Amino acid sequence: QQQVKQSPQSLIVQKGGISIINCAYENTAFDYFPWYQQFPGKGPALLIAIRPDVSEKKEGRFTISFNKSAKQFSLHIMDSQPGDSATYFCAASESNYQLIWGAGTKLIIKP
Amino acid sequence: KAGVTQTPRYLIKTRGQQVTLSCSPISGHRSVSWYQQTPGQGLQFLFEYFSETQRNKGNFPGRFSGRQFSNSRSEMNVSTLELGDSALYLCASSLITSSGELFFGEGSRLTVL
């Protein structure tokens, strides 16, 4: 029940396309859903996060879509660029507990 | 503002040895979490410290331990190293709780031979 399932494991998208990464969870007590971006040789960095009181949050080319009834959330990267090539992690947590992480998605944007 | 600093960045040990890794959080951050990252297992939570007290603990054997000092700096120790302990060990700091935004260091890459 504490798992966060992330898919796909890897993704190749053409430059300018839309990258979509999905995550699903079971614990309805989760109230914070961040996405982290990790480049090789670096630690993960917060990209964008959402709370369950909204269904969508957009920051530039990055959008989180949140479906509370389906217990799913996804990251959309519009107009994907080669600089977006990285590993993306979704996560979820409930207050005062540590983040539960997805397994990660390796995204490659082909020029 | 300086980021999270982890030392050493790389180290090689042999089976049976022990290792200590250090983490200096962002100034003012009181929560420090440790993660193990491997290609097959993703990010695995080890433990979190807040005000020198372990607040949460992941599912790792007792060979993995940690502590936090009064200045919020943290260390983790792995005793009796096994080949499977080879991984990138990441430290993350946050203001109060690890359920909010985490700021990660670049990690300490441990290779066990």
Image: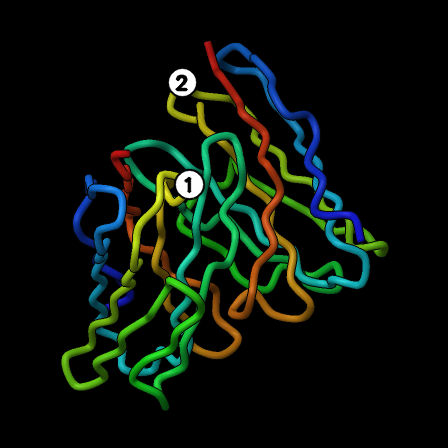
In the picture, measured across the screen, residue A110 lies left or right of residue B23, that is left
Q: Nearer the viewer, mark 1 or mark 2?
A: 1
Residue drawn 47% across the image and 59% down it: A47
Please rate how many residues cluster around mark 1, counting C-alpha atoms within 10 Å: few if below 14, some from 14 to 19, many from 20. Answer: few
Q: Do the residues labelled 1 and 2 touch (CB within 8 Å)?
A: no
The residue most toward the right is B71
Image position, residue B87 (x, y; %): 45, 28
Task: Give the quarter of the image for residue B30.
Answer: bottom right
Q: Is mark 1 on a helix, strand or loop?
A: helix
Which residue is label 2 attached to? B83
How many numbered badges does the structure rendering display?
A: 2
Which amino acid type corresponds to the residue marked 2 in the rendered image?
Answer: Leu
Which amino acid type corresponds to the residue marked 1 in the rendered image?
Answer: Gly
Co-location on one chain, circles 1 and 2: no
Label 2 marks a residue whose chain is B
Image position, residue B80 (x, y; %): 52, 22
Which residue is label 1 attached to? A83
Label 1 marks a residue whose chain is A
Q: What element carries label 2?
A: helix
The numbered dot on residue A16 is none
Against B40, is A46 above or below?
below
Residue drawn 23% across the image and 84% down it: A68
Along the line of sight, which residue is nearer the eye, A19 or B14?
A19
Image position, residue B1 (x, y; %): 80, 53
